Image (tube, rainbow, N blue to C red):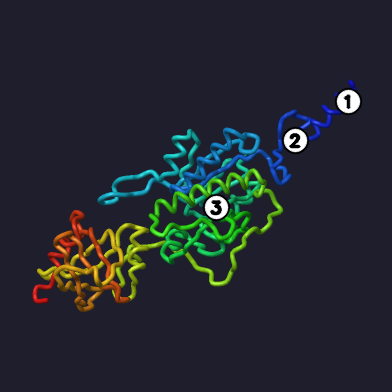
Amino acid sequence: MILKHISRSFAHLSRQPWSIASHRRVHYCTTSGKLSDPLRILFCGSDNVSVEALQAVHTESLHNPELVERVEVGVLPPKASGRGLKTKVELPCEKAAASLGLQCHQIPTFTGWHMPDDINLIIAVSFGLFVPPRLLRQAKYGGLNVHPSFLPDLRGPAPIHHAVLQGDTHTGVSLQTLHEKTFDHGTVLAQTPAPGIAILAHPTLSLTTRKLGIECAEMLVQGLRDGLHVPPYENAGWRNADGLRHAPKLYPGDLKIQWDIWSAEDWQRRLVMKRAIWTNAMTNKGKRKRVIFHDARPVSAAEVQGTRGMVATVDDGDGDPVRREVVVDRDDGSVYFLTGRGVWVRVRRGRLEAEVEKDAAMVVRSLLVRDA
């Protein structure tokens, strides 16, 4: 009986990743059977997607310190905002790090920046700065990133925006290694199974972003538990490489109405992203004004009712104004515009630059061409 008890004790000890010299845990056995050092993570993030991931990794450190021993946070400096760019606004990830009591490093550039010596994994989520090879090589396990698209499709800084813009019905998340030379070219270690997460028929960007942020956080933590950060790496991407799309940063010019090109769906998708699309128009006093619309939906010709008129839109540069037909419904404040695809859209709310938002009918009142 005594020998049986001793043998069970040694069998139990043999399954534990202990160091005989120090009698402390030095490795964590992941679900895949790979052994990992306790992770001392530098988490680099900026936006709300990265906040979801940071909170998940921090929670894992509280409940599973054998796997995640410590988390430090790298953030960009506060962003200039407001009139004259005089107000400094902390990015969401910095606020989250402070609320969680985590040590935070402001990193305007990695040039000349020295990472704490004992960091053994770098995680970058929506960070915006390229992590240089010298830091990836300093960290024993290099770096990881979660990207809200089916890599290699929609590589780039705005994958969620472009998925909405292009009318994708499903989207997903990829966990990848950080590449030493370029963004979004690492080995895909895990990916949302096909067909992915359904994009609602009438989504808001914030809702889609939140869903993908949660998916990113869950995939990242599960990837750590599974030891996906420990080489050798296996490519788990299933997306066909044919017809890959890029997801570059969007600029205000991307939201300028292309009257002769955009369909009604183009109006709607851009409004989902920013809740504002715009055009330049001439007032009936001869002044050029930017006009911003905050909603639009396609309607049939039978639904169009009101007083017909003309507004004169102008492109950038010295082009001549182009008259476009509108129908103004003063009873409910709507304005109907004819798109370049021959479909009417109804707009309820908008504003002129430097003015407050109001009914669309009030907005276009000063734009109607008098002799129309």
Q: CA distance from mark 2 to mark 3?
A: 29 Å
Q: Which quarter of the rendered picture does the C terminus lie within?
A: bottom left
- Name the secondary structure under disc 2: loop
Q: Residue 90 vs residue 170: left or right?
A: left
| Image coordinates for residue 105, horizontal then vertical, percent | 48, 41
Left or right of 138 in this view: 266: left
Give neighbour class at mark 2: few <14, some 14-19, many 20+ (Cα, 10 Å).
Answer: some
Q: Is residue 227 left or right of residue 73?
A: right
Residue toward you, 322 or 295:
295
Q: Residue at image x 24%, y 68%?
A: 303
Q: Position of residue 154 (x, y in %)?
A: 50, 63
Q: Is residue 55 above or below residue 356?
A: above
Is residue 320 depicted above or below 238 in this figure?
below
Corner quadrant of residue 264: bottom left
Image height of 323 relative to 269, above or below? below
The label on residue 32 is none
Q: Residues within 10 Å of mark 3 (few under 14, many from 20)?
A: many
The kind of residue on which mark 1 rests is Lys
Identify the residue at image location x=38%, y=55%: 204
The amino acid beneath tag 3 is Val
Residue highlighted by disc 1: 4
Q: Which residue is situated farthest in the top direction here?
A: 2
- Quadrant into which the N terminus falls: top right
Residue pointed to by mark 3 = 146
How many numbered tags mark residues here?
3
Residue denoted by label 2: 17
